[in-house]
Each structure stands twice: as C-alpha cells, then as structure tokens.
Image: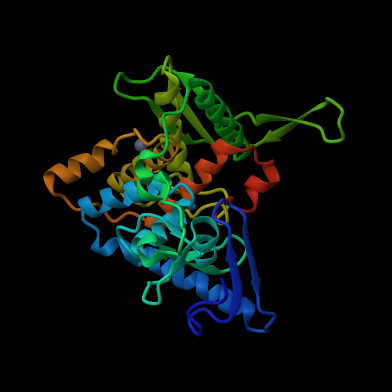
Amino acid sequence: MSSGAPGLFGQGSLELDLEGQLELSLAEEPSAASSADQARQSVDDLVRGAQRYRTASQYADLLRAVGSSRHLSPLNAVLVDVQRPGATHVLTAARWRERHRRVVRADAQPLVVLAPRGPVTFVFDVTGTEPLEGAPPLPLEVTDPGAAVAATGEPALTARLDRLVDNLVGLGVGVRTGRLGSQQAGSVRAVTGGRPLRRERVARGGRQQTVVERVPLRYEVVLADGLEPRRRLVALLHAAAHVLCGHLGTPDPLWWPDRSGVEHDVEEWEAESVAHLVARRADSSVELPPSVQQHLEAGLQPPLFSLERLARATGDLEAYGTRRFRSAELGRARPTT
Ligand SMILES: [Zn+2]
C-alpha cells in the first residue's frame, strides 16, 4: 500500500507481508528517523493506555483474538484489538487485493500496526473490504480464525520444547527437573554465582564440529518430575514468562525492563496469560487460564498488568519455540517487533 493517513506518521511507502516478511521503504527525508520514533512512541502509548477500560470479559476477548491471529505478531494482534475490538482478520489493502480479490471500502477504518524494521503500516479488517467481481469465497482462516489450527502432535511438541530450552539457555536460564510440591508444575528464581550453562552449536563451514559456549547462569527453572510434554511446555512457558516480564529483575534493561516491584497477583496474571497465548496460538483447543476464568465468573476487574510487556514476552517465547537464535542475537535485539 502507499502511504496512508498523511500527516499522522509522515510520508512513506509501506508494504507488509503478513506471513512474516515485512518490507518498508521510508521516503528519504531528514525527518524520517524522528517520525519513525514518534510513530513507535504513539503505538507504545496506545498499548499502555489500553488496559484502563478492560473488564475480565474484554480481556477474555482480547486473549481469544490474539490467540487466533496467528498471521500477526502478538503485539500487532494486541494493537489491532485495542483499536478495533472484534476485528477478525486484518491485511494491508494490497494483500486483500492480491490474495482475496477484495478492495478496501472508502469508509474503512485503517488500523496501525508495527513493522519490524520500520515504524508502522496500516491494515484493514475484513469487514472494511468488499469483493471484486469473481472473488473466491473467503477461506476458513479468515471467516473463523479460532477454528483453524489443530492440536500439535507429540513430536512437534517435544521439538518446540527443546528449541525453547536451548534458546533460554542462551539467555542464561537453566532448566532442570526436580521434586516440587504436589500442586506445583514449575518454579523459577534468579541465581548468582552458579556454574555457567553450556550451549552447544555446530561450527560453521561444513565441518561437523561442535562449539560449546558458556553462558552465565542467571535464572533457574525447575519443572516437576514426570510431567507429560504438554503440561511441561506450559509450565516452562509460565516460568520463562516470569523472567521475560522482568518479575525477577533484568541482566540488561535492553533485554527486558526490571519489574521486580510488581505485585504478586499481577506477576501471576501476566505469566499465565503469556503461557496461555503461546500455547493457544499453536493449538486452538487450549482453554482460558484459570485466573481469567475466575475473574470472569466473579465479575472481577483484571489487575493493572502491562499489556505491552505481556505481548512482547509472548512474541519472544513463541519465536524461541520456533527457531534457534544465536546467543548474540538473544542478547541484543529482541526477536519481536
Ligand atoms: Zn507463576
């Protein structure tokens, strides 16, 4: 699409491939960098301000929306829901035309989302589009995104678990099994002075040589003995979410903020939500977290959690289960937008 909403985020040509390849070319103007920063700032403010009007049932709707919008990063799915609750499937105008032979109506509301290497781009919900002549019927992923993903089989689950553990080791999070209380599936704590973790990788250049990196042990996760893979994955996601949400402090504020002062119920709310969302985006049969369920039944308001941090931690943990990151990548840039 060409630049939308002139004046709001400056001029530029923005193109979004929602399968993860995002391209963006900003007009070569001296003000491009600062308008990019401003755009990101506006988006951050949008997400930060969003929780003020959320009830437990709005929150449950948000979880369902982010859990089923797999073609968007979790943060972008949150952004879409914040701007237009109930949006079902969003694409750029160009993608609607190419993939579904649909055009965006003149009165459709543009929704701003983040692009990984640029500032922002604009997308439109399916309800703001209409078919061109000869357009095919909309596929299930558009009409019923919640029903589109089947449960993951055990080999895929185990592979995901292994990749997650490996990437967490790269961040200094050691994972082991042990005996825990009967109600407890996992635990996590910050540690200092432990033995460094070993992370192996195959050397480049075609030789089958293994290189061992040593990573300082910063956090230790203990998972209960004998958990079946699905519960093990959720317990690990929950524990890792505490780390990535900053509940145990931070080794570097660029990795994640130090949020060690937040209240316990907020910590649990965030960790449960992150674990739920990562699991739900891989398997649509995953149910709402118990604490959200309880809030819904009792008509309680959600605690004052950080929606932005929750979305970013979800994006990071989803990426960590999907591919292996080099330790340097893990340490510097976050994989999420
Ligand atoms: Zn917890």
Numbered label tally: 0
- The image position of residue 137, as x and y in percent, is 41, 51
Give 333 or 285, whichever is nearer the viewer.
285
- 18 displayed left or right of 302: right
- The image position of residue 265, as x and y in percent, is 28, 45
The residue under the point 30% across, 35% down is 287
Q: Is residue 159 above or below residue 68?
A: above
Give 145 or 300, whichever is nearer the viewer.
145
Ligand 1 shows up in which quadrant of the image? top left
Q: Quadrant of residue 327?
A: top right
The residue under the point 42% across, 25% down is 230
Q: Residue furthest top?
A: 226
Residue 259 visible at all: no
Instruction: Give the position of the N terminus as an image quadrant.
Output: bottom right
The residue under the point 45% across, 53% down is 136
- The image position of residue 177, as x and y in percent, is 48, 20
The residue under the point 41% across, 18% down is 227
Residue 167 visible at all: yes
Applied colour scheme:
rainbow
Q: Quadrant of residue 235?
A: top left
Instruction: Give the position of the C terminus as an image quadrant.
Output: bottom right
Give 50 or 97, whichever is nearer the viewer.
97
Q: Residue furthest left?
A: 298
